[in-house]
Amino acid sequence: MSVIVLMPAHDEAERISASVTAARSVSSVDRVVVIDDGSRDDTAALAAGAGAEVLVMPTNVGKGGALQAGLNAVRDDADILVLLDADLGATAAEAELLIAPVLTGDAGMTVGVLPRPARSGGLGLVKGLARRGIAMLGNGFDALAPLSGQRALSRQAWEAVEPFAPGYGAEVALTVRALRAGLRVIEVPVSMTHAATGRDLVGFAHRGRQFLHVLRTLIALLLERR
Protein backbone atom coordinates (compact mmCIF):
# COMPACT_ATOMS: atom_id res chain seq x y z
CA MET A 1 0.00 0.00 0.00
CA SER A 2 1.82 3.11 -1.25
CA VAL A 3 1.13 6.36 0.63
CA ILE A 4 2.30 9.51 -1.15
CA VAL A 5 2.17 13.06 0.20
CA LEU A 6 1.56 15.95 -2.19
CA MET A 7 2.67 19.29 -0.77
CA PRO A 8 2.03 22.36 -2.98
CA ALA A 9 4.31 25.25 -2.04
CA HIS A 10 4.72 28.86 -3.09
CA ASP A 11 7.45 30.94 -1.43
CA GLU A 12 7.53 28.71 1.66
CA ALA A 13 11.28 28.77 2.32
CA GLU A 14 10.72 29.56 5.99
CA ARG A 15 8.79 26.38 6.80
CA ILE A 16 9.20 23.90 3.95
CA SER A 17 12.15 22.00 5.44
CA ALA A 18 10.34 21.36 8.72
CA SER A 19 7.12 20.42 6.89
CA VAL A 20 8.88 17.89 4.66
CA THR A 21 10.87 16.42 7.53
CA ALA A 22 7.72 15.97 9.62
CA ALA A 23 5.74 14.43 6.76
CA ARG A 24 8.57 11.98 6.04
CA SER A 25 8.64 10.97 9.70
CA VAL A 26 5.15 9.41 9.45
CA SER A 27 5.72 5.66 9.38
CA SER A 28 3.12 4.91 6.72
CA VAL A 29 4.36 7.59 4.28
CA ASP A 30 6.46 6.27 1.41
CA ARG A 31 7.14 9.46 -0.57
CA VAL A 32 6.79 13.21 -0.13
CA VAL A 33 6.41 15.20 -3.34
CA VAL A 34 6.66 18.99 -3.15
CA ILE A 35 5.18 20.93 -6.06
CA ASP A 36 7.05 24.23 -6.16
CA ASP A 37 4.43 26.52 -7.64
CA GLY A 38 6.55 29.23 -9.23
CA SER A 39 8.36 30.22 -6.02
CA ARG A 40 10.78 33.16 -6.09
CA ASP A 41 12.74 31.95 -3.07
CA ASP A 42 14.67 28.78 -2.15
CA THR A 43 11.60 26.61 -1.56
CA ALA A 44 12.57 23.97 -4.14
CA ALA A 45 16.18 23.59 -2.99
CA LEU A 46 15.23 23.43 0.67
CA ALA A 47 12.50 20.85 0.01
CA ALA A 48 14.96 18.66 -1.89
CA GLY A 49 17.51 19.07 0.89
CA ALA A 50 14.93 17.82 3.40
CA GLY A 51 14.37 14.67 1.36
CA ALA A 52 11.36 15.50 -0.81
CA GLU A 53 10.96 14.80 -4.48
CA VAL A 54 10.45 18.20 -6.08
CA LEU A 55 8.35 19.08 -9.10
CA VAL A 56 9.01 22.65 -10.22
CA MET A 57 6.29 24.58 -12.03
CA PRO A 58 7.78 27.24 -14.34
CA THR A 59 5.00 29.68 -13.45
CA ASN A 60 2.47 29.99 -10.64
CA VAL A 61 -0.53 27.84 -11.57
CA GLY A 62 -2.43 28.05 -8.26
CA LYS A 63 -3.13 25.40 -5.67
CA GLY A 64 -5.47 23.25 -7.73
CA GLY A 65 -3.15 23.26 -10.72
CA ALA A 66 -0.14 22.39 -8.56
CA LEU A 67 -1.98 19.49 -6.95
CA GLN A 68 -3.06 18.18 -10.34
CA ALA A 69 0.52 18.30 -11.60
CA GLY A 70 1.60 16.36 -8.54
CA LEU A 71 -1.11 13.76 -9.00
CA ASN A 72 -0.21 13.34 -12.67
CA ALA A 73 3.34 12.58 -11.60
CA VAL A 74 2.42 9.86 -9.06
CA ARG A 75 -0.90 8.43 -10.21
CA ASP A 76 0.57 5.05 -11.20
CA ASP A 77 2.04 4.55 -7.73
CA ALA A 78 -0.33 6.18 -5.22
CA ASP A 79 -2.75 3.92 -3.36
CA ILE A 80 -3.38 6.65 -0.78
CA LEU A 81 -2.87 10.31 -1.55
CA VAL A 82 -2.17 12.71 1.31
CA LEU A 83 -2.54 16.46 0.76
CA LEU A 84 -0.64 18.73 3.15
CA ASP A 85 0.01 22.46 3.14
CA ALA A 86 3.65 23.50 3.00
CA ASP A 87 3.50 25.78 6.05
CA LEU A 88 2.57 23.17 8.66
CA GLY A 89 6.12 22.79 9.93
CA ALA A 90 6.60 20.07 12.53
CA THR A 91 2.82 19.61 12.89
CA ALA A 92 2.73 17.90 9.48
CA ALA A 93 3.49 14.73 11.45
CA GLU A 94 -0.18 14.77 12.48
CA ALA A 95 -0.91 13.43 8.98
CA GLU A 96 -0.78 10.01 10.60
CA LEU A 97 -4.24 10.70 12.07
CA LEU A 98 -5.62 11.40 8.61
CA ILE A 99 -4.08 8.34 7.00
CA ALA A 100 -5.20 5.74 9.54
CA PRO A 101 -8.98 5.69 8.74
CA VAL A 102 -8.22 5.44 5.01
CA LEU A 103 -5.76 2.59 5.55
CA THR A 104 -8.37 0.64 7.51
CA GLY A 105 -11.11 1.34 4.98
CA ASP A 106 -13.22 3.32 7.43
CA ALA A 107 -13.17 6.38 5.17
CA GLY A 108 -12.69 7.20 1.53
CA MET A 109 -11.49 10.65 2.43
CA THR A 110 -10.45 12.28 5.69
CA VAL A 111 -10.30 16.02 6.35
CA GLY A 112 -8.21 17.58 9.08
CA VAL A 113 -10.02 19.94 11.45
CA LEU A 114 -7.40 22.33 12.82
CA PRO A 115 -7.66 24.24 16.10
CA ARG A 116 -9.00 27.74 15.68
CA PRO A 117 -6.09 30.21 15.82
CA ALA A 118 -6.00 32.42 18.91
CA ARG A 119 -6.04 35.47 16.63
CA SER A 120 -7.90 34.54 13.48
CA GLY A 121 -7.44 36.90 10.55
CA GLY A 122 -10.56 35.79 8.72
CA LEU A 123 -14.08 37.16 8.85
CA GLY A 124 -15.75 33.82 8.15
CA LEU A 125 -17.27 34.81 4.80
CA VAL A 126 -15.34 32.33 2.71
CA LYS A 127 -15.82 29.51 5.20
CA GLY A 128 -19.53 30.24 5.43
CA LEU A 129 -19.92 30.22 1.65
CA ALA A 130 -18.01 26.94 1.41
CA ARG A 131 -20.06 25.28 4.17
CA ARG A 132 -23.37 26.28 2.64
CA GLY A 133 -22.25 25.20 -0.80
CA ILE A 134 -21.07 21.79 0.39
CA ALA A 135 -24.32 21.22 2.30
CA MET A 136 -26.37 22.17 -0.75
CA LEU A 137 -24.39 20.15 -3.29
CA GLY A 138 -23.07 17.37 -1.05
CA ASN A 139 -26.22 15.71 0.26
CA GLY A 140 -26.53 17.92 3.33
CA PHE A 141 -23.04 17.26 4.69
CA ASP A 142 -22.24 19.82 7.42
CA ALA A 143 -18.51 20.47 7.02
CA LEU A 144 -16.67 21.79 10.06
CA ALA A 145 -13.55 22.45 7.99
CA PRO A 146 -14.73 23.04 4.41
CA LEU A 147 -11.50 24.76 3.36
CA SER A 148 -9.01 22.47 5.06
CA GLY A 149 -6.12 21.50 2.81
CA GLN A 150 -5.08 18.62 5.06
CA ARG A 151 -6.59 15.44 3.63
CA ALA A 152 -6.04 11.76 2.86
CA LEU A 153 -7.78 9.99 -0.01
CA SER A 154 -8.02 6.37 -1.07
CA ARG A 155 -7.35 5.55 -4.71
CA GLN A 156 -11.10 5.15 -5.23
CA ALA A 157 -11.60 8.62 -3.80
CA TRP A 158 -8.94 10.50 -5.74
CA GLU A 159 -10.01 8.84 -8.96
CA ALA A 160 -13.60 9.95 -8.26
CA VAL A 161 -12.76 13.57 -7.44
CA GLU A 162 -10.17 14.54 -10.02
CA PRO A 163 -9.37 16.77 -11.79
CA PHE A 164 -8.62 19.24 -9.01
CA ALA A 165 -10.64 22.43 -9.25
CA PRO A 166 -8.60 25.55 -9.99
CA GLY A 167 -7.06 27.71 -7.30
CA TYR A 168 -8.56 27.86 -3.83
CA GLY A 169 -11.71 26.01 -4.89
CA ALA A 170 -9.85 22.69 -4.85
CA GLU A 171 -10.88 21.58 -1.36
CA VAL A 172 -14.57 22.38 -1.77
CA ALA A 173 -14.70 20.38 -4.98
CA LEU A 174 -12.93 17.44 -3.32
CA THR A 175 -15.58 17.22 -0.62
CA VAL A 176 -18.58 17.66 -2.91
CA ARG A 177 -17.38 15.14 -5.49
CA ALA A 178 -16.47 12.56 -2.85
CA LEU A 179 -19.93 12.84 -1.30
CA ARG A 180 -21.62 12.66 -4.69
CA ALA A 181 -19.65 9.48 -5.40
CA GLY A 182 -21.10 7.91 -2.25
CA LEU A 183 -17.79 7.85 -0.40
CA ARG A 184 -17.53 8.23 3.34
CA VAL A 185 -15.95 11.55 4.33
CA ILE A 186 -14.68 11.84 7.92
CA GLU A 187 -13.46 15.03 9.56
CA VAL A 188 -10.60 14.31 11.97
CA PRO A 189 -9.46 16.71 14.73
CA VAL A 190 -5.74 17.41 14.41
CA SER A 191 -3.31 19.70 16.20
CA MET A 192 -1.80 21.07 13.00
CA THR A 193 -0.97 24.76 12.79
CA HIS A 194 -0.05 26.99 9.89
CA ALA A 195 0.57 30.64 9.16
CA ALA A 196 -2.76 32.44 9.53
CA THR A 197 -3.71 35.15 7.05
CA GLY A 198 -3.42 38.58 8.64
CA ARG A 199 -6.00 41.35 8.90
CA ASP A 200 -4.13 43.66 6.56
CA LEU A 201 -4.42 44.66 2.91
CA VAL A 202 -2.57 41.58 1.72
CA GLY A 203 -4.73 39.34 3.90
CA PHE A 204 -7.99 40.85 2.71
CA ALA A 205 -6.87 40.57 -0.92
CA HIS A 206 -6.06 36.89 -0.35
CA ARG A 207 -9.48 36.23 1.18
CA GLY A 208 -11.14 38.10 -1.68
CA ARG A 209 -9.46 35.83 -4.22
CA GLN A 210 -10.35 32.80 -2.13
CA PHE A 211 -14.02 33.86 -2.00
CA LEU A 212 -14.17 34.27 -5.79
CA HIS A 213 -12.45 30.94 -6.40
CA VAL A 214 -14.84 29.10 -4.08
CA LEU A 215 -17.86 30.82 -5.63
CA ARG A 216 -16.75 29.91 -9.16
CA THR A 217 -16.12 26.33 -8.07
CA LEU A 218 -19.57 25.99 -6.50
CA ILE A 219 -21.21 27.31 -9.68
CA ALA A 220 -19.21 24.83 -11.76
CA LEU A 221 -20.19 21.99 -9.41
CA LEU A 222 -23.83 22.99 -9.66
CA LEU A 223 -23.65 22.54 -13.42
CA GLU A 224 -21.41 19.48 -13.31
CA ARG A 225 -22.68 16.08 -14.24
CA ARG A 226 -20.71 12.96 -13.24
Image: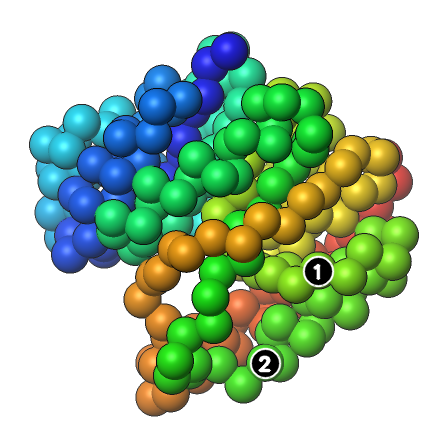
The residue that mark 2 highlights is: 124
Which residue is located at x 71 percent, y 42 percent? Answer: 185
The residue that mark 1 highlights is: 143
Query: Residue 77, position in %: x, y?
Result: 48, 12
| Image vertical order of residue 160 relative to residue 16, above or below | above
In the picture, measured across the screen, residue 174 lies left or right of residue 141, that is: left
- Can the viewer see residue 86? no
- Amino acid type, residue under disc 1 in the picture: Ala
Q: Which mark's residue is nearer the viewer, 1 or 2?
A: 1
Which residue is located at x 34 percent, y 30 percent? Answer: 26
Mark 1–mark 2 distance (CA, rounded to whole Å)? 14 Å
In the picture, measured across the screen, residue 157 lies left or right of residue 56, that is: right
In the picture, measured across the screen, residue 148 lies left or right of residue 225, that is: left
Earlier in the chain: of badge 1 and badge 2, it is: 2
Q: Secondary structure at mark 2?
A: loop
- Looking at the rendered structure, the number of numbered marks drawn on it comes to 2
- Amino acid type, residue under disc 2 in the picture: Gly
In the picture, measured across the screen, residue 2 lies left or right of residue 45, that is: right
Closer to us: 56 or 53: 53
Q: Secondary structure at mark 1?
A: loop
- Can the viewer see residue 70? yes
Closer to us: 211 or 176: 176
Q: Which mark is residue 80?
A: none
Which residue is located at x 28 percent, y 29 percent? Answer: 24
Closer to us: 52 or 141: 141
| Image vertical order of residue 7 relative to residue 31, above or below | below
